[in-house]
Every structure is written in C-alpha cells, then in structure tokens.
C-alpha cells in the first residue's frame, strides 16, 4: 500500500478541519471477503464517501467539504493545519440517524444503507455468539432491498443476500435460481448453500 497526500477539508457543520487520507496504490493481499459484499483489505482500505467529523460528530459527504490544502505525508505539517483531525467511520446508529433525516439522492441512499448493513454485521463476522438483527437493521434491509433492481445481476445477488439475512430463505433461493454470468455464479452458489440450510448470518467467502 502506498499512501497518497492528505487532503485537508473544512467541515460544513462546524467549520473545523478534517484530514482525508488518499491512496496512490494498493492491493488485496490478505483481504477477506464476505457475503454481504464487504471487503476487508488491509493493503487497500476503502476511501469512504460519508464520514464522521471528530470535532462535532456530524456525518458529511467528504467530497462536498471545502478543500483548504494538501499535505504531502513526507513533509512536516503546516502550522495552519495543526488542529486538523482525521475523519472516523460512522457507527450503525450514526447511519440510522442520518437516514431518518432523509436522503433525497438514490445513489447516496444506497451507499448509506449498504454501509449501515456492513457496520451492523461487523460484530457478527468473527463472533461465536450471533446477535439477531435489530429492528433498525431489519427496516434498513427492507428499505435497501426495495431500491435494488432485480434485472441487474449485481443487484439481484445483493438482494438475495439481504433476503437470506432477513430469514426469507425461499425468496433468496428464488433470486439465486436465475442465470448469472460466470463471475457472479460463484457468489450465487456461496449464498445459495446457507439459504437452503436456513442460516441467516453473514459468512466469509473463501476463494480456492
């Protein structure tokens, strides 16, 4: 992984400075993949779109925040940016609260609902005891599924996984019984097996 320069942005909620990390290059060595679509890649971390300001706790779209400077990681920080703090990832509750305010753009709404799903599942990825979905998580998945287009293969795979995690196994199997191109057929098979076994928890995908 080769980090890029740090972009300094001004939070639109509190006017304080946020650090935005960037990547010049990365790879998926050591990455883990999950049935809900999340990829944990230490050498290729996600550059998030919606972030949480450490100063005020507001969730903001990082590309909409005013850029005030760029700091090369190899150089000393400029005094004018010494109070800048890196953003942090929102929690599931942060995402749910953000959604309750309404997101008018469909692409943005899908982004938030997917990350809320992932954030909720994070506690289930390696835990022995599986926590049932909360009412907020169920409502989020129902709303996310309604936004997906079943005529699109990628959306159909995502919706099938949503149905499985909601315990709607017959719906998941029906969605997975349609045709998929070779790359997605593998994912469909991975999700179909626990659907038949009536297992709802998120699962890791292992590639041969």
Image: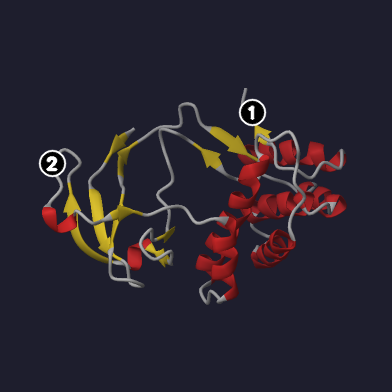
Residue 18, image x and y in percent?
30, 58
Spatial CA span between label 1 and label 2: 40 Å
Residue at the image point whose x is 68% and y is 41% from the top: 124
**Viewer-nearest residue: 43 or 177:** 43
Residue 205 sits in which quadrant?
A: top right
Residue 123, image x and y in percent?
64, 43
In this rendering, the count of numbered labels is 2
| Left-right relation of 80 to 22 | left
Residue 180, image x and y in percent?
69, 45
Residue at the image point whose x is 73% and y is 33% from the top: 128
Residue 47, image x and y in percent?
40, 49
Q: Secondary structure at mark 1?
A: loop
Residue 75 disc label? 2
| Left-right relation of 196 to 98 | right
186 shown above or below 89: above
Q: In which quadrant is the C terminus drawn?
A: top right
Residue 206 disc label? 1
Residue 52 disc label? none
Report crowding for label 2: few under 14, some 14 to 19, many 20 or more residues within 10 A (C-alpha).
few
Residue 4 sits in which quadrant?
A: top left
Residue at the image point whose x is 52% and y is 66% from the top: 107
């Amino acid at each position: 992984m080769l980090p890029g320069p740090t972009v300094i942005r001004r939070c639109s909620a509190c006017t304080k400075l946020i650090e935005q990390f960037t990547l010049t290059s990365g790879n998926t060595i050591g990455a883990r993949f999950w049935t809900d679509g999340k990829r944990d890649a230490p050498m290729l971390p996600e550059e998030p779109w919606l972030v949480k300001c450490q100063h005020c706790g507001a969730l903001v779209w990082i590309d909409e925040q005013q850029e005030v400077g760029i700091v090369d990681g190899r150089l000393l920080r400029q005094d004018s940016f010494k109070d800048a703090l890196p953003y942090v990832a929102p929690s599931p509750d942060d995402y749910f609260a953000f959604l309750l305010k309404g997101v008018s753009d469909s692409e943005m709404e899908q982004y938030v609902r997917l990350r809320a799903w992932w954030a909720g599942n994070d506690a289930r990825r390696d835990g022995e005891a599986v926590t049932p979905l909360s009412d907020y998580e169920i409502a989020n998945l129902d709303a996310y599924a309604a936004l997906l287009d079943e005529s699109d293969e990628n959306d159909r795979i995502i919706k099938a996984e949503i149905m499985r995690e909601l315990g709607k196994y017959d719906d998941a199997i029906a969605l997975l019984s349609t045709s998929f191109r070779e790359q997605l057929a593998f994912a469909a098979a991975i999700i179909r097996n626990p659907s038949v076994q009536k297992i709802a928890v998120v699962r890791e995908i292992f590639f041969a």
